[in-house]
Image (tube, helix red, strand yellow):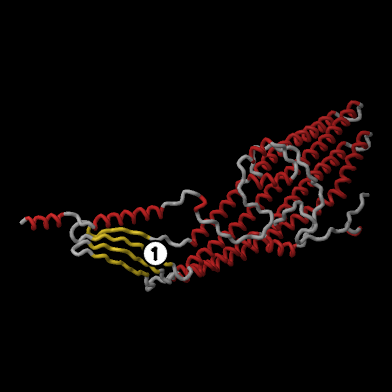
């Protein structure tokens, strides 16, 4: 009876192997937790892989100090275009956004090549009793057919595309700064011209007033010249508004809207090169970063097609483990499992078809980009040539005649040899000519900025040795010069 009781008590006690099974399960859970916990130190993360680099000069990719904006606001007032360009490259948020896009693409490229993590599990189909079981397993997916390599190659083309887009974003910023700079420079010239026209109108008023006092003029003439003087004065006052707004636009273009801007130091009348249209179109397509980004997108689509083609090749899932069978007698068992999908129905047909269509679309997008750039080059060169010719003729022929006409007419009017209508007509011709000359300068510089943007020129104003630039032309022959004044 006592022996039976002892046997019964022995059966009621938990088996000695249960402690080992619980310990095994705890170790599996702890190991899984340690495996899945991200590293604390930054240097423990995977190092950056070497992305596809672009052999492009002058493209800084470093971080921007946070105090540069304050230094620019409280520092000396910039005057030259190069100073504004330097501030824009350091502070414009568009460039910081493009740099962040490159870093994001690099992160995706790193992630695309990382191998799947193993899966560790501990479980018990029956947790208590004479026939309880305790198991621990480790499973690992084996990626086949180079899927990770192909995925990373596609991601690396996205890195390359992001770098080309950064180059394009940088020249977009340069274009905006250059346009704002020369627009402000033209506004400064407008103030000078309106000041000159106001002085001329004031002098005409003084002459008319003196003639009226001498009895050689009428009060109507004096009132008329007073109106012309007032119109010239209000034009001069309004021109200062464009100076103020132009300064704020330039400050915004460099990414520092609070920076103070004074008088710019540049030559508005600088000679600029001529360009051959056909060579310009070819050069733009070759050097511009937008087609290069489109080509990188084509390469990405091709790698994506290769990745889609190997997707039906199944990955292999291997699982191995240990199981403790509690009982009389206790048993130790090994667990092995091999799993793989069978591509019976889904062989990735739809994604393969979509990837092929994406390649065709990317190639068409490249062609569209090249045609758009060629069209922009043609439009820019048309405005550039016409405005350049207008500037040359106004500067060399038309303006000197208009200014001399006003001087002679004022002298004759003061002597009573011509009527005030002749002087008025001469002044209006001069006003229209001066304003047309300034507008031609504005068109010339805007089109020059556009051409430099299409060619992605680091140097501005463009030199005569620029791509598609023509040698400096000799003076026009006498046969096509304007006729001399009678």
SS state under label 1: strand
Quarter of the image holding residue 288? Answer: bottom right
Residue 399, x across and y down, in percent: 85, 46
Q: Is residue 92 left or right of residue 395?
A: left
Quarter of the image holding residue 382? Answer: bottom right
Q: Residue at x 37, y 70 (%)?
A: 341
Residue 455, x across and y down, in percent: 71, 58
Q: How many marks?
A: 1
Quadrant of the frame with the N terminus: bottom left
Residue 328, x across and y down, in percent: 18, 63
377 up-or-down from 219: above or below: below
Q: Residue at x 47, y 48 (%)?
A: 40
Identity of the residue furthest to the left in this view: 1
Identity of the residue furthest to the front in this view: 3
Identity of the residue furthest to the bottom in this view: 344
Residue 191, x across and y down, in percent: 77, 38
Who is closer to the viewer here, 463 or 18? Answer: 18
Neighbour tally class for label 1: few under 14, some 14-19, many 20 plus, Cα within 10 Å: some
Who is closer to the viewer here, 106 or 365? Answer: 106
Quarter of the image holding residue 348? Answer: bottom left
Q: Can residue 94 be seen in the rendering of this structure?
A: no
What residue does disc 1 label? 140
């Amino acid at each position: 009876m006592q022996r039976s009781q002892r046997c019964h008590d022995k059966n009621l006690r938990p088996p000695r192997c249960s402690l080992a099974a619980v310990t095994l399960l705890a170790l599996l859970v702890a190991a899984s937790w340690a495996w899945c916990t991200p590293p604390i130190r930054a240097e423990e993360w995977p190092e950056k892989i070497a992305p596809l680099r672009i052999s492009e000069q002058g493209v800084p990719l470093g971080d921007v100090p946070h105090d540069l904006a304050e230094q620019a606001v409280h520092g000396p007032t910039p005057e030259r275009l190069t100073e504004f360009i330097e501030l824009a490259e350091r502070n414009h948020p568009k460039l910081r956004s493009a740099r962040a896009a490159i870093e994001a693409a690099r992160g995706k490229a790193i992630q695309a090549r990382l191998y799947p993590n193993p899966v560790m599990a501990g479980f018990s189909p029956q947790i208590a009793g004479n026939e309880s079981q305790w198991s621990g397993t480790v499973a690992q997916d084996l990626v086949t057919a180079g899927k990770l390599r192909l995925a990373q190659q596609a991601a690396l083309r996205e890195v390359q595309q992001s770098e080309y887009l950064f180059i394009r974003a940088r020249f977009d910023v340069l274009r905006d700064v250059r346009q704002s700079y020369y627009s402000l420079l033209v506004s400064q010239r407008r103030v000078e011209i309106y000041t000159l026209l106001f002085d001329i109108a004031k002098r005409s008023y003084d002459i008319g007033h003196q003639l009226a006092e001498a009895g050689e003029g009428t009060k109507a003439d004096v009132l008329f010249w007073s109106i012309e003087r007032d119109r010239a004065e209000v034009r001069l006052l309004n021109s200062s508004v464009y100076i103020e707004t132009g300064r704020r636009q330039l400050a915004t273009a460099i990414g520092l809207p609070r920076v103070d801007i004074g008088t710019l130091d540049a030559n508005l009348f600088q000679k600029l090169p001529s360009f051959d249209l056909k060579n310009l179109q070819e050069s733009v397509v070759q050097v511009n970063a937008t087609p290069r980004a489109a080509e990188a997108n084509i390469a990405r689509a091709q790698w994506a097609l290769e990745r889609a083609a190997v997707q039906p090749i199944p990955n292999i899932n291997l699982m191995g483990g240990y199981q403790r069978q509690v009982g009389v007698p206790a048993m130790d068992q090994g667990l092995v499992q091999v799993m793989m999908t069978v591509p019976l129905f889904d062989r990735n047909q739809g994604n393969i078809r979509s990837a092929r269509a994406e390649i065709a679309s990317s190639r068409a997008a490249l062609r569209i980009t090249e045609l758009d750039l060629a069209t922009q080059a043609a439009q820019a060169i048309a405005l550039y040539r016409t405005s350049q010719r207008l500037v040359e003729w106004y500067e060399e022929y038309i303006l000197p005649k208009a200014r001399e006409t006003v001087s002679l007419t004022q002298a004759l009017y003061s002597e009573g040899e011509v009527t005030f209508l002749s002087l008025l007509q001469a002044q209006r011709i001069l006003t229209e000519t001066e304003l047309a000359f300034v507008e031609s300068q504005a068109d010339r510089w805007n089109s020059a900025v556009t051409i430099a943007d299409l060619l992605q020129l680091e140097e501005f104003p463009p030199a005569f040795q620029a791509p598609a630039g023509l040698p400096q032309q000799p003076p026009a022959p006498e046969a096509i010069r304007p006729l001399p004044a009678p």
